[in-house]
Amino acid sequence: MKQMSDIGSRRKKVTFTLLGCLVAAGFLITANAEEKPKSKETSAKKPTVNAISKTIAPAEQTKAKVSKPIFYPALTAREQTLEVALKMNTDADFVESTLQDVITYYSDRHKVPIVIQTKDLENNLGITPEEPIDAHFSEISLSDALLQILDPLDLTFIVDRGLIQVLSKETAARTFKTRVYPVADLCIIDEDYLVLGASIQNANLGDWKPVRLSTTLSNPKSEHGQKGSGGRGYFNVQGALGGGLGGGLGGGGGSLAEYTNEPGGTISVVQQSHALVISQTWHAHNAIVELLTQLRQAQQDSE
């Protein structure tokens, strides 16, 4: 009996020992399980160098990509909104609709203000906003759609005073804006400005005033339009590329041109600012921007 009792007590000791080990192991497992999330959480809170650089880099790249305006004054936020809307695709399915209904449809659809200059239409063309319109097309820009509809009526549109205005072609041709185009990247010497200005005029992008008189300025041998060089003054103003400037530097002197009173745009070179000063219609300015963009692209492709 004593032997059996000893065996039972030994078993109890082994059992308690095993239970103790299991409990201790349980505590260790729990402790490790709690420690691991903490370590992960701690490491997650420490941003790596790569993470920091990835966060900062896009902002720096955005700053680097900011380009100078193609012309001054730059478009306002409202004008930019109108320009974007005019490039959006649209369609038309009009049968005996009035001009007013068509314009209202596009204004509502593209959420931009499009107005008809009623008095201009009546005074210059003898037509009203009730003029019937038949048009069917799809997947063209709003700008092209308006031109397609308005052209047969001898009408067009311009962006002016924060509105898309529908008016007669005659009035649009007399509505000028003056813009300054920086062209230092396209011009190196005096003759480059002349060639660029003449190219704009010869590209048939608008009507230009004829030159009446060209006055040669003193000391024509200034180099690269530098400030005060050759006695040509601070601005080195060159005018009227077709007859004034074209014959000015080429013939040995700069020239300040006078224009006739006939309608049309004007273009002058202000070499001190490395810019062209152009007065033209809204449509002509758009064409000039496109031409300068193409010239810059051609320049990049040739490098």
Image (cartoon, rainbow, N blue to C red):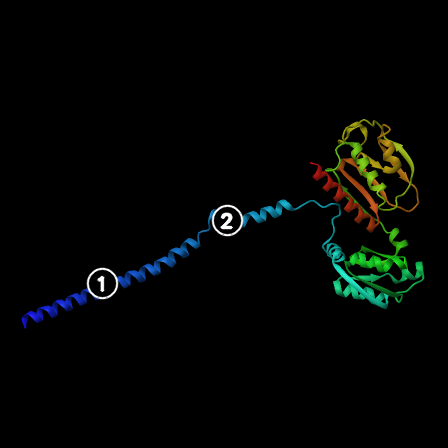
Q: Which of 275 and 103 is in front in this view?
A: 103
Residue type at tag 1: Cys
Would you place residue 252 above or below residue 171 in this image? Answer: above
Q: Mark 1 points at which residue?
A: 21
Residue at the image point whose x is 79% and y is 56% from the top? 143
Residue 29: x and y in percent read: 30, 61
Residue 137: x and y in percent read: 80, 62
SS for callout 2 = helix
Q: Nearer the viewer, residue 235 or 78?
A: 78
Would you place residue 242 above or below residue 136 in this image? Answer: above
Instruction: Indicate which disc, 2 or 1, sits on the residue closer to the N terminus.
Output: 1
SS for callout 1 = helix
**Left or right for 181, reference 248:** left
Q: In whole angstroms, how far apart are the C-alphas of marks 2 and 1?
A: 47 Å
Residue 86: x and y in percent read: 76, 57
Q: Assess disc 1: are there few (<14), some (14-19) or many (≥20) residues with their C-alpha within 10 Å of its C-alpha.
A: few
Residue at the image point whose x is 85% and y is 60% from the top? 149
Residue 47: x and y in percent read: 46, 51
Q: Name the residue under label 2.
A: 52
